[in-house]
Structures are given as structure tokens and as C-alpha cells.
Amino acid sequence: MTTYGTPSYADLDPSWPAGLAYLAMFGIMFGDVGHGVLLLLGALALRSGRPRRLAPLHRLWPFLAGAGLAAMTAGAAYGEFFGPTGVLPVLWLAPLESPARLLAAAVVFGAGLLVLAHVAGAVNRVREGGWATGLYAPSGVAGLLFYLGLASAAAGLVLHVTPVASAGAALACAGLALVALGLFRNTAGGGAGLAETGVRLFDVVIRTGTNTLSFARLAAFGLTHAALADLVWRGTTGLAAHGPAWWAGAVLLFAVGTALSFGLEALVAGVQALRLEFYEIFSRLFETEGRPFRPWHVPPAEPADTLLRR
């Protein structure tokens, strides 16, 4: 949270919810029970202070442990244990066998996060500028109504429920009209104001769609992680099938391949989850920025022996 900025005094502080959302998104992209266990072991090592050169990172051990648990939970749903080894049953879906289903679930999950971000953003706009600002702002009540209507219309169309789709479309139009009115109120008026409102309204509509679809990267990188683990496992079993003389090579391939895929995918999943929070979620929460609170305190008196030496 502090990497993005300091919430103003009036705003909600989303540090804990944002942290939990980050872990959930990381787990979806890094879903593997075996890899999650490695993260958990790393967290325990940090907590114990070993190795000593990593001691400055000690306070990060709960975060690393949470990432490991999230990866293990998603991996159990995928049936992944260092890849599709068959050690665990598939509780929900196998990513490489049901990519479209995973993609749809990722977008729905992201839409839920965006709804929560809109709700928190509406609260922040009311606290910052009163009910008028909260009502008309794209990240306020108007934007929330537009997004809820758009999501309801999309769900109605996918599920072939016409009344839901119609009601959602009407709600989206009402929300968009409020957004347009709010944007126009902040212009100088006249033809130039109408043109500016049109451009900014177009941006709101496009950004809403692209931000929602951006959560498809959760599924995309989850598939990439599963594909790399599958490649390593296929190579390992292929070598081992040639006989005992190849078993040492199979073990070496598994160890090196797992280390490479683990390091690469952990970095990618960590960056992509952070990117989703910064651009898709936090952009709806904050419009103003505060300053960190640093209380004034009386400087401690110098020891008597120091004064005598002087």
C-alpha cells in the first residue's frame, strides 16, 4: 500500500483487503501445492532468521507464508503437485484441460474485486467532497451503478435471462448519464465542455471494459505456470522411462527445471498481481494523497557521561 501512496485522512485504508486480494491473485497464477510448500518453507526460514544474510527480510515472513498457502489452495483445486504428477486429485479443474473455464472464472473474480473497489471508491468520494462529488464521480456512486448494470447485462446475456439483461442495461445507462453529468459540471460549459465530456466519457467506458478483461491474465499466467510444470514433469518421466541408467539425469532435470520454473513464475505472478492492484483497483480508490503521520516527540536527553566528555 505504501508503495502506491499514503491514503488521505478521509479515505478508507485498504491495506489489509488489498493484501488478501494480492495473495489470492498470486495463488491463482502460481497454483501448485509443491511450489506452495517451497514458499512456506522459505517463510519459516525467514522467521527463524536463517540464513543470516536474509535477516533484513524477516518481517516479510507472514506475507511469504500467505503466498504459499494461497498457492497450495489453488494447486489443490487444480490437482497440481510439482505439475500434473497425479499425486493429487483434481478438485475443481485442470488448467491445461479447461482453459476457457479458468479464463471465465478469472474474469468473474476480477469483476467482483472491481465492484468492491467501486464501493470503497464511492465511500472515499463522499468523505472527500460530500454527497454531490460521491454521486457523480466515475469512481463514485455513478461509476458503481454503471459497472453493476454492465455486469448484470453481461450476466443476463450469457445466461440467456432477458429481464436481467434489460434491467442491467437500464441501470448502466442511468449510471453513465450520471457520470456524464458530473464530467460536464467540471468543465467550462458550452461546446468545448460537451466535447471534453464526450472524450472523457468514452475513456470511462473503454477503461471499464479493459480493466475487467485485464483480469484474464490471472488465467493466462496460471496456464503458463501449469504448462512449464507439465513440461518439466514430462521430461523427467521421459528420461526415467529409459531405465536406471537415466534416473540420475531425470532427478537432475526435475530439480533444475523446477527451480527455473519456480523462480520465473514466482516473479511473474508477483509482478502481475501488483500491476492489477495498482492500475485496476487502486485507481478507483484514490484521487487524493495524504502524508504519513509522524508524531512529534521530545528528543531524549544525552547521557551524563557524554556531557562530561564534552
Image (cartoon, rainbow, N blue to C red):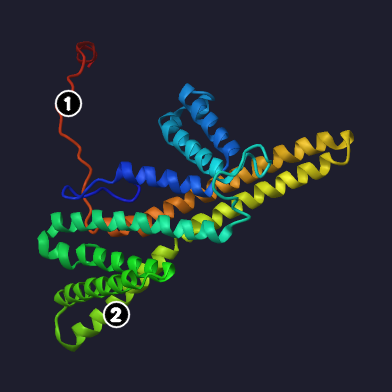
Answer above or below: position of 53 versus 180.
Answer: above
In the rendering, at what x and y percent does residue 171 appear?
A: 25, 71
> Within the image, what quadrant is residue 63 found in?
top left
Answer above or below: position of 78 versus 143.
Answer: above
Which quadrant: the C terminus? top left
N-terminal label among 1 and 2: 2
Task: Look at label 2 and name its amino acid.
Answer: Val
Q: Left or right? Give the position of 229 relative to 51.
A: right
Q: Left or right? Give the position of 149 relative to 85.
A: left
Task: Look at label 1 and name its amino acid.
Answer: Pro
Question: Can residue 2 be seen in this snapshot?
Answer: no
In the rendering, at what x and y percent does residue 127 appear?
A: 14, 54
According to the picture, the residue beneath numbered tag 2 turns out to be 199
Question: Can residue 210 be seen in this snapshot?
Answer: yes
Q: Quick one: 290 or 305, which is closer to the camera?
A: 290
> Within the image, what quadrant is residue 110 found in?
bottom left
Q: Left or right? Give the position of 297 relative to 17.
A: left
What residue is drawn where x is 42% and y is 67%? 159
Q: Quick one: 221 or 50, which is closer to the camera?
A: 221
Query: Dot 2 surroundings within 10 Å: few (below 14), some, or many (20 or more)?
Result: few
Of all residues shown, which one is farthest toward the bottom?
191
Query: Dot 1 surroundings within 10 Å: few (below 14), some, or many (20 or more)?
Result: few
In the rendering, at what x and y percent does residue 71 appear?
A: 52, 41
Instruction: Tell me the number on the disc at residue 192.
Output: none
Give the structural element (helix, strand or loop) at label 2.
helix
Q: Quick one: 58 or 153, which is closer to the camera?
A: 153
> Within the image, what quadrant is residue 293 found in?
top left
What residue is drawn where x is 82% and y is 42%? 239
Label 1 – label 2 distance at C-alpha: 55 Å
What residue is drawn where x is 15% and y is 33%? 296
Q: Quick one: 305 or 88, which is closer to the camera?
A: 88
According to the picture, the residue beneath numbered tag 1 turns out to be 299
